[in-house]
Amino acid sequence: MIKKFLLSSLVVLCSLSALNAQTKTKETNKLEDPDNLASQYFSQVMGVAVDATSNIKLYKFIYEWIGTPYRFGGNTSKGIDCSAFTKAIYDKVFNTTILRNSRDIFSMVDPLSKDELKEGDLVFFKIKSRSITHIGIYLGDNRFAHASSTRGVVISNLNEPYYSRYFYKGGRIIDAVKNDLIEE
C-alpha cells in the first residue's frame, strides 16, 4: 500500500515537474522570440503600446532614420523632408509606391478622422496654410513618425498642442486597402 502511494505520488510529482518545465520553456521562448523582443523594445523607445507594434519592419525602418536632419527636398540619410520620409517608408515597408508631395499623396487616400487611424495610416497637417504642408505616418497611441523641419526625423504625439492645432485629416492609401497591405 505504501509502495503504491509512493509510486503514485512520484508519478504526480513528475507530471507536475514536466508541466512546469513546459510552461517555463514556453515563457522563455516567448521572451527569446526576436519579434516579441523587437516589439517590446520599439514600444518602449517610441512610446507606443506593445500590442500596437504589429509591424516590426515599420518600427525598425523608423528607428534607423530617427535623428536624420530635415532638409527640404532631401531624400537621403544626410537630410530628408516629410514627404520623402513617408514615401521611403511606403516603398521599403509596404512595397507601395506613393507620390512625392504631401498634397499629392493626400489625393491617394481615403480620408480618416483621428479616431479611425491605425498603424501605417498617414496623418496630414495644414501648418499655417490653407493647403496641406506636412505629412507623417501613424504608429498607434496617438504617436506618429515624421521629418520635422526643426527636429529632423522624430516621433511626436497628435495630442501635442502644436500638432493638434494643425492636424487636418488622416488617410489610408486606397491601393493599400485594396491589396490588404494595411490591416483594417
Image (spheres, rainbow, N blue to C red):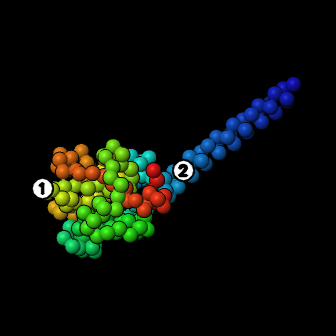
Query: Which residue corresponds to the image point at 46% horizontal and 53% vertical from the top-left?
Result: 183
Classify 10 Å Cα crowding around label 2: few (below 14), some (14-19), many (20 and above): few
Which amino acid, mark 2? Answer: Lys
**Disc 2 vs disc 1: which is toward the camera?**
1
Q: Is residue 31 left or right of residue 92?
A: right
> Considering the image in quadrants, where does the N terminus appear?
top right
Q: What number is the disc on residue 183? A: none
Question: Based on the displayed image, in which of its 4 quarters is residue 98 positioned?
Answer: bottom left
Front one among 135 and 79: 135
Query: Which residue corresponds to the image point at 32% horizontal and 52% vertical from the top-left?
Result: 111
Tell me the residue that label 2 is attached to. Answer: 30
Question: Based on the displayed image, in which of its 4 quarters is residue 159 positioned?
Answer: top left
Element marked by disc 1: loop
* Location of residue 151 with respect to 2 vertically, above or below: below
Which mark sits nearer the N-terminus, 2 or 1?
Answer: 2
* Location of residue 25 with respect to 89 vertically, above or below: above
Classify 10 Å Cα crowding around label 1: few (below 14), some (14-19), many (20 and above): few
Q: Measured from the top left, where is residue 84 in percent x and y?
A: 28, 69
Q: Is residue 108 left or right of residue 79?
A: right
Front one among 132 and 23: 132
* Location of residue 85 with respect to 24 vertically, above or below: below
Front one among 111 and 42: 111
